Amino acid sequence: MLTIVERIKTERKEQDQDKNWHVVERSYGSFTRAIPLAFDPDAAKVEAKFDKGVLRIRLPKPAEMAKKQHKIEIKKDQNTARDDHNRSRTESDVAGPPPSG
């Protein structure tokens, strides 16, 4: 699980000694996001960078995860094959006869 937590606390003060006034503005906020991962990342290899309002996190996959590949065979059923044939015929009809020469 990757958990990102940001807490913001800012304070701005202004004052004018001659006019006898001062202003204090305070802002507080927090942000939390939890993202489930398919693997436990190596904390020593995790990289995070915050630049111009964008947080980039790099979580390299463990070697055993990177090697795993799953092949999924995609089969066409008869209706799909018939639709493909009709579509091809329609496309060639629209294109017109081949140029002679």
Image (cartoon, helix red, strand yellow):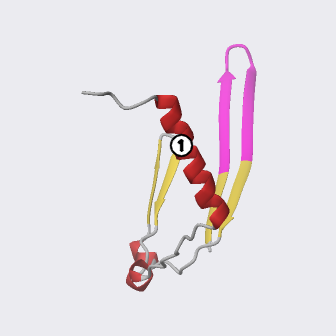
Q: Is residue 84 above or below residue 25?
A: below
In the picture of the structure, the residue carrying the numbered disc 1 is 89
Q: Provide residue 16's location: percent of width, then percent of height.
A: 67, 19
Give the crowd class for mark 1: few <14, some 14-19, many >=20 residues within 10 Å: few
- SS assignment at label 1: helix
Q: Is residue 24 above or below residue 9?
A: above
Q: Is residue 24 magenta?
A: yes
Q: Residue at x 66, y 49 (%)?
A: 8
Q: Residue at x 61, y 56 (%)?
A: 82
Q: Provide residue 42's location: percent of width, then percent of height.
A: 45, 79
Give amino acid for label 1: Arg
Q: Would you identify the image quadrant in which residue 26 lies?
A: top right
In the rendered picture of this protein, how many numbered marks are placed on residues?
Answer: 1
The C terminus is located in which quarter?
A: top left
Residues shaded magenta:
8-28
Task: Tell me which secondary structure the magenta stretch mostly adopts.
Answer: strand
Q: Residue at x 72, y 13 (%)?
A: 19
Instruction: Find the residue positioned furthest to the front.
Output: 100
Q: Is residue 70 above or below residue 29?
A: below
Q: Provide residue 92's location: percent of width, then percent of height.
A: 48, 37
Q: Is residue 101 magenta?
A: no
Q: Provide residue 71's location: percent of width, then percent of height.
A: 48, 77
Q: Between 25 and 56, which is closer to the camera in this rendering?
A: 56
Q: Between 81 and 47, which is closer to the camera in this rendering?
A: 81
Instruction: Find the residue positioned furthest to the top.
Output: 19
Q: Between 6 and 23, which is closer to the camera in this rendering?
A: 6
Q: Residue at x 66, y 26 (%)?
A: 14
Q: Would you identify the image quadrant in which residue 37 lies?
A: bottom right
The N terminus is located in which quarter?
A: bottom right
